[in-house]
Amino acid sequence: MRWALLLLGLIGCADDPLYGPCDTANDCGDPADGCYELRYDRSDGTTAEGRTCSLRCGRDASCPNGGLCLALDGDASETFLCFATCETSMDCFEGHACTATTGGAGSSICLPQ
């Protein structure tokens, strides 16, 4: 029974590319509005980059599935995008890691590794 629930969860993730990895906007479906190239500073002082399906936002309430609306430190464009929240990297799509945020958000979000 436990395996069936896990498999159902994985299938649900595969059908919902929001907050998942991408190469082009064609890899992303609604409600994502694009495949965003992210360059950001991690809380440990290192920098990282990668691509993710997301959408522009102005507040957390506009992010589906309980996402957070944030602009990443190190992102020169300072674009506010929706990011999936997580407790561990197992909550994220493959290729993304659960990363602690600093400042007011006080949560962790899935970011490309």
Image (cartoon, rainbow, N blue to C red):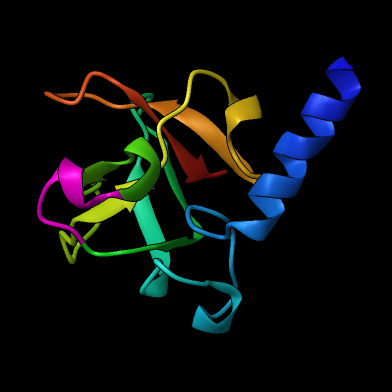
Residue 32 locus on image (x, y percent) = 40, 67
As for residue 25 lying within the magenta part, the answer is no
Q: Quadrant of the N terminus?
A: top right
Residue drawn at point x = 67 percent, y = 47 percent: 12
Q: Is residue 46 above or below residue 107?
A: below
Q: Residue 104 vs residue 112: left or right?
A: left
Quarter-of-image position of residue 54: bottom left
On screen, residue 103 versus residue 55, left or right, reads left
Q: Residue at x 47, y 43 (%)?
A: 111
Residue 51 is left or right of residue 7, and the answer is left
Residue 72 lies, in percent from the top left, at 25, 47
In this rendering, the answer to whether 86 lies above or below 70 is above
**How far across and how far down the image is residue 67, in percent?**
33, 40
The stretch drawn in magenta includes residue 59: yes
The magenta span reads 57-63
Name which quarter of the figure residue 113 lies in.
top right
| Horizontal relation, residue 14 to residue 55: left or right | right
Q: Nearer the viewer, residue 13 or 35?
A: 13
Residue most extreme to the front: 1
